[in-house]
Amino acid sequence: MSLRIDLHCHSTASDGTLTPAELVTAGAAAGLDVMAITDHDTTGGWAAAAATLPAGMRLVRGAELSCRWHGVRPAISLHLLAYLFDPDDPALTAAMLELRDDREQRAERIVDLLRADGVPITWDEVYGYAAGGSVGRPHIAQALIRAGLVGSTDEAFASAWLGARYFVPKSDLDVFDGVAAVRAAGGVTVFAHPRATKRGRVVPDELIAELADAGLFGLEADHEDHSPAEREQIRALAGRLGLVVTGSSDFHGTHKTVRLGAFQTAPEVYEKIVATATGVPVLG
Ligand code: AMP
Ligand code: ZN
Ligand code: FE
Ligand code: FE
């Protein structure tokens, strides 16, 4: 029987709604054999997930780094999945700390903009929803839902709200610095949802080729934000560049509708990631 592998999942350490312990338990219940915890800009969920790992489940410890490509104006933001890196690497920890600080300042600015227009939410409320984890727009969405202004997280991301009118960019990590920092910490990088146009502008293939030269390991092809045609384009590009392709749910609990294991990664790709990384081992 082939392993069921989901390499992109969020917990309450960032903007997921299950705690790390609940996440790995839900993964086992969903029939997964391998799952990665990839919270935004933090390893804060690693210990709790490891401590509650169900029998038979293998845990790939990772993170999703907020990055930016400065090759065009304005710069394009993108997400880099980082796997099995040393969580104590000084440069990478400092970079993630800066990213989390920036997330807080940016969310506070968004809340200020909303309040200036009379929206009855507060920074305390939003900060409370984040509960010590990396703050993200889904936490602001939660406040907008509570205030009765939108009916869902998806609606809160529409252009009338967090998608454009009340959008404030994060500063983010230069994507080449991100790839280099993860590699220096013994980790492996995979470009998350590289063709997700619904999230904004996407980068050209030329950049992905440059990232491959800089040590990028893979591209996430099977993701709910990609059409079947986009998934095929990514597979073809990965083939040309010698990159692996992954598939993952990008599970966020009730902040999204996608289920754990909805998209999966091939066992041989998982084995390649594990064989290449030197930061920390897979657990379980
Ligand atoms: P942020 O990281 O603060 O910029 O917020 C973006 C995060 O919100 C991403 O991790 C998305 O996965 C999540 N998210 C949840 N629902 C949506 C949506 N409808 N559109 C875009 N992002 C969403
Ligand atoms: Zn997220
Ligand atoms: Fe992402
Ligand atoms: Fe994600």
Image: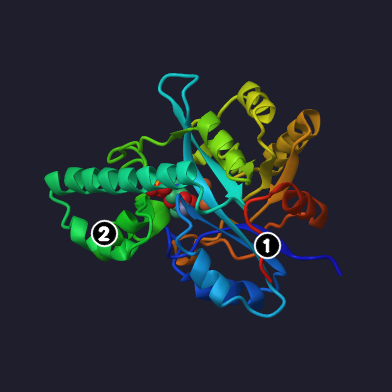
Q: Dot 1 corresponds to which residue?
A: 282
**Residue at the image point whose x is 58% and y is 36% from the top:** 179
23 with respect to 272 (left or right): left
Label 1 element class: loop
Residue type beneath disc 2: Val
Q: Quadrant of the C terminus?
A: bottom right
Task: Judge: label 2 CB < 8 Å from ligand 1.
Answer: no
Q: Is residue 253 above or below residue 101?
A: below
Q: Residue furthest bottom?
A: 55
Q: Residues within 10 Å of mark 1 (few under 14, many from 20)?
A: some
Q: Nearer the viewer, mark 2 or mark 1?
A: 1
45 or 88, which lies in front? 88
Q: Dot 2 corresponds to which residue?
A: 126
**Residue at the image point whose x is 50% and y is 40% from the top:** 198
Residue type beneath disc 1: Val
Q: Gap between marks 2 and 1, in whole Å?
A: 34 Å
4 or 270, which lies in front? 270
Q: Is residue 46 above or below residue 270?
A: below
**Residue at the image point whose x is 18% and y is 57% from the top:** 122
**Residue at the image point whose x is 75% and y is 35% from the top:** 238
Label 2 element class: helix
39 or 182, which lies in front? 182
Q: Quadrant of the N terminus?
A: bottom right
Q: Quadrant of residue 8?
A: bottom right
Residue 70 x %, y %: 46, 23
Q: Is residue 158 above or below residue 195?
A: below
Image colouring:
rainbow
43 or 206, which lies in front? 43
Residue 20 x %, y %: 50, 70
Q: Is residue 200 visible?
A: no
